[in-house]
Image: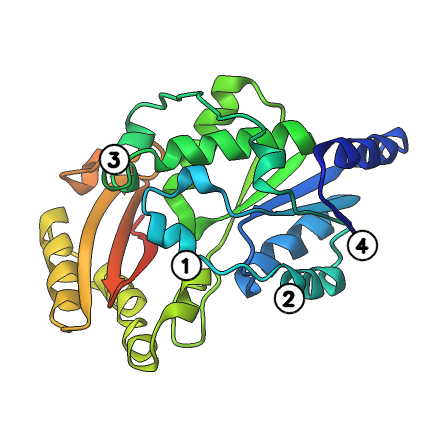
Amino acid sequence: MKIVNSIQDLKRYLAEERQHNKQIGFVPTMGALHNGHLSLVKRCVEENDVCVVSVFVNPTQFNDKNDLATYPRTLDKDCALLEPAGCDYVFAPTEAEMYPEPDTRTFDFGTVSAVMEGARRPGHFNGVAQIVSKLFYAVEPDNAYFGEKDFQQIAVIRAMVKQLNIPVKINACPILREDDGLALSSRNVRLTPEQRQKAPLIARTLKESTNFAAGKSVQEVIDYVVNTINADPVMRVEYYEIVDGNTMESIKNWSDTDYAVGCITVYCGEVRLIDNIRYK
């Protein structure tokens, strides 16, 4: 496994791989890797000849400076996990390498990036589009892999790839969970023991809501989820929306779509956790 810090070196290595007609798979990460990331790497290794994983905490997608400052950075530990997982190249650039000058590009993906996370974290998805497009230009992968925990982000990246005509297949991979249901996240390490005990309420409530939904309206299901989670004093729902899984537009009736997905963000103490569930 090679650890590469410059775009120029990465392009040179991958050009050599392509000369042997090798298919290249790519998993972009911000590090602090866990089994959720490793499940993406495993699929990338299985489906491609070469697996590239980037580790880069991207400053342009953080609208909260404190969140950026406290985001865990564990490159040595990450590499120790990636090598046995079958990764061939770890791309770990500096901020200066990825942003030698400010990226002033602004993107408009319509509703897909304007609602939910887009509405509450101004500039977040623009920053995501900036860095993921830069990474795609550096790696030029045939396949890229993203976890469905970041459900809206995948929709934004699909829109970006289409808008910029980047020839890459976007592969969405299922959420990996702890035994108690909590979606794996790099942010989970910031939970106190009490908060970690409470956090599985999110996934449990979402799962229960799929049974509760029978014969109920969309709004009744939303109210059920929000009230159930907010009943715990450690938890605070920032939003819960049931949307069309393709457009991210909120639905009012179940008949509005045949792909209904519930997307939630909850503060557990000061830690912001996201999750989602499919209704149909």
| Residue under label 2 | 77
Distance from disc 2 to disc 3, alpha carbons, whole Å, reads: 35 Å
Instruction: Name which of mark 1 and mark 2 comes first in the sequence.
Output: 1
- Whether residues under marks 1 and 3 lie with C-beta atoms below 8 angstroms apart, the answer is no
**Residue 269, picture quadrant:** bottom left
Q: Is mark 3 on a helix, strand or loop?
A: loop
Distance from disc 3 to disc 4, alpha carbons, whole Å, reads: 40 Å
Give me the disc on residue 99: none
Give me the disc on residue 115: 3
Give me the disc on residue 1: 4
| Residue under label 1 | 70
Q: Is residue 35 visible?
A: yes
Q: Which of marks 1 and 2 is in front?
A: 1
Relative to 238, 80 lies left or right: right
The location of residue 118, given as percent across then percent down, is: 29, 36
Type of the residue with mark 4: Met
Q: In which quarter of the image is the N terminus?
A: bottom right
Type of the residue with mark 3: Val
61 lies above or below 100: below
111 lies above or below 242: above
Q: Which of marks 2 and 4 is in front?
A: 2
Q: Which of marks 2 and 3 is in front?
A: 2
